[in-house]
Amino acid sequence: MFVSYHSHQDNSVSLSKDLSALKINEVPLIFLGSNFWWLNRFLEFDDLQKNISNLVNVYSKKNVLNRKNIYHVVVPEKDFYLNKFLKTYSNDSFNLINIITNMFGNNYESLTNSKYIPFTNRVFDLNEFNYYDSHLTTKCYINFFKEIIYSFNNEYRNIYLPFDIKERLYWGDLGKKFIECYQGEKYQMINTDKEIIIDKEFKNNFSNPLRDTRVLIHNEKAKIKKSVLIAGDSHSSLFGNSKFTELFSMVFETTEFIWNPYFIHDTPEDIDFDKYDFVLLEISQRFIFNLPK
């Protein structure tokens, strides 16, 4: 089946050869991929509502319930986040996806002892997103990070956040889909503090399968003398990728990341939740539409 989509008349559109990625006005985006993100807009609202209810039930049964200081976030997809510029969604489709995303967050919150943190859209310049990667900009993650820790404790607004951004060579996950000899590109990333120590027990590398990926980071000079456990995906990622794991490690004394969005997979037996001051559950927006079989 050919996938149709809403496209503003002024948009220039091109697909990658494998049909998994898309460029609109020179902005590379996820298109299909294994989770069929763009197909979900064609489902009926009642079907989506039922799917979300089923998914929340699956996730909530896997989680550590009745614990304090559990927070959860859904990170928006690049095309959804940029819709006011790209107009890739009709108003009805955009509103539907927004409703379903927040329905997931709010329903999960109602079933668990946790707090849902919806993110604010702060895009001002479309040109900042012309890189070959499906993720958002480092500035976006910094803004999201602030919203998260301010939800942890409003007094954290008074803390100076030591984020220095500079251009570094980066290999985007969509590069080879459009450029056969892709050699990376300049990308705005965090200039990391050298005082941070990665625990030798857990290597700062992606594992196979990804669900085995785990990293523990210590920062003796942290502004916040607290610990956080992150159960997420590539929006948290490893240290050095300018995502949530690195941001937390530069401000919190102890940061542990497990590639396990919302703990949908089995929780490692050696995890002691009581030793963490905060637990953050993170997931990519497109994955909440990808029902477990």
Image (tube, rainbow, N blue to C red):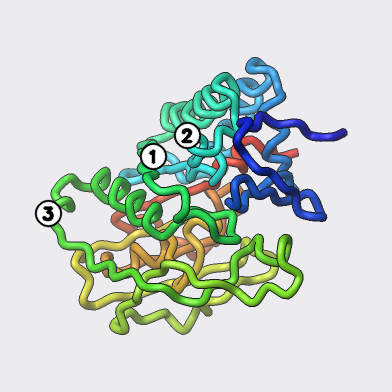
Q: As shown in the figure, which amino acid type bears the numbered disc 1?
A: Asn
How many numbered marks are there? 3
Residue at the extreme front of the image, as rendered: 10
- Residue to which mark 2 is pinned: 84
- In the rendering, which numbered label is found on residue 121? 1
Label 3: few (<14), some (14–19) or many (≥20) C-alpha neighbours in 10 Å: few
- Residue to which mark 3 is pinned: 158
Q: Are marks 2 and 1 in contact (CB under 8 Å)?
A: yes
Q: Identify whether 120 is placed above or below 183.
A: above
Residue at the extreme top of the image, as rendered: 46
Left or right, residue 87 beside residue 181: left
Q: CA distance from mark 3 to mark 1?
A: 22 Å
* Badge 2 or badge 3: first in the primary sequence: 2
Label 2: few (<14), some (14–19) or many (≥20) C-alpha neighbours in 10 Å: few
* Badge 3 or badge 1: first in the primary sequence: 1
Left or right, residue 233 beside residue 255: right
Residue 36: image location, x then y, percent = 73, 41
Position of the C terminus, as image quadrant, is top right
Q: As shown in the figure, which amino acid type bears the numbered disc 3?
A: Asn
